[in-house]
Image (spheres, rainbow, N blue to C red):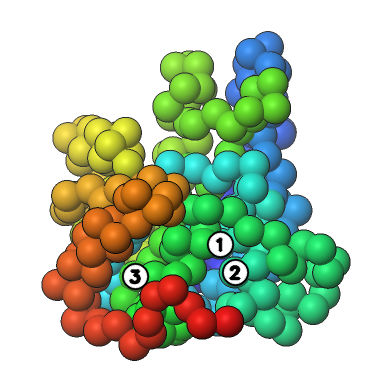
Amino acid sequence: MDKIIDLHLSFMDRLIEEGDVLRELERERIFILPGFTDQAELVRSYYKKYYSKPSQRIVFCGINPGKFGAGKTGVPFIDFYGISRLLPGISLLLPAHDRQEKERSAQFMLSIIEEYGVGEFQDAVYVTNLSWYGFLRDGRNLNYYILPRAVRHHFIESFVEEMKIVQPSFIVPLSEEVGRTLRQMVKDGQLDYPIAERLPHPLHGSFPTNLKKTRMRYHKCIEQHTGLQRKGIYPREE
């Protein structure tokens, strides 16, 4: 899976070298989050441990990193607290305050991972985002579909190459907008994988009023399409 990390790093190298896209974003006061490039070796460690085993996986596909969670760790839907549980040896190299840093979407995803078993989950489900890079404007998160039309496509084209490496059985969008984008990619001949019914975004599912219903939908999708069965009990006992 090193190819996936290299793919997204080389994309940023190309943006820097060519300059046009970055200048357009600068004109719009849009800043690219540096979490993935800053933590590339941490991401490699995660992918080496959990995605190096050949396996037919389904894909959970989100939007793009926010300024917390994946926007800092570089690992889709994993915050530093999740890193401390999933890569404990690596986490010891992080500042102590980072190891306990949590983000709502990442906490929801971590609870799903631990219910099905760390390792077993990743053998069956590959978690990613359409854009590996997140964005800020005036200090607030900005999603890829709000980017200027002239540059928007640049940040999601690498996803097509990523899927060629993963070879998923199908892709599950984790938001309505992601579903629309994926279906358009299929229509345009860019993607050749089935697009499943969307699941609620983990942020939506993290709120107490949505939690039970959202978890049930994730359970149904995972168990119906992967054969995994829950091993843990939610909430976790610390």
**Residue furthest bottom as drawn:** 231
The image quadrant of residue 117 is bottom left
Task: Please name the residue that numbered disc 3 is placed on.
Answer: 125
Q: In this view, does 191 lie above or below 1?
A: above
Q: In this view, does 36 lie above or below 78?
A: above
Question: Looking at the image, do the residues carrying marks 1 and 2 touch, with CB atoms under 8 Å apart?
Answer: yes
Pick whichever, 34 or 111, lies toward us.
Answer: 111
- At label 1, the amino acid type is Ile
Residue 213 place in picture, x, y as percent = 24, 56
Q: How crowded is mark 1: few (under 14 residues within 10 Å), some or many (20 or more)?
A: many
Q: What element carries label 2?
A: helix
43 sits left or right of 213 in the view: right
Marker count (numbered):
3
Q: Is mark 1 on a helix, strand or loop?
A: loop
The quadrant of the rendering that contains the C terminus is bottom right
Kindly identify the residue that appears in the image at 49 percent across and 31 percent down: 143
- At label 2, the amino acid type is Gly
Q: Is mark 3 on a helix, strand or loop?
A: strand
Residue 184 place in picture, x, y as percent = 23, 33
Task: Please name the residue that numbered disc 2 is placed on.
Answer: 82
Kindly identify the residue that appears in the image at 68 percent across and 12 percent down: 27
173 sits left or right of 54 in the view: left
Task: Please name the residue that numbered disc 1 is placed on.
Answer: 78
Pick whichever, 212 or 100, lies toward us.
Answer: 212
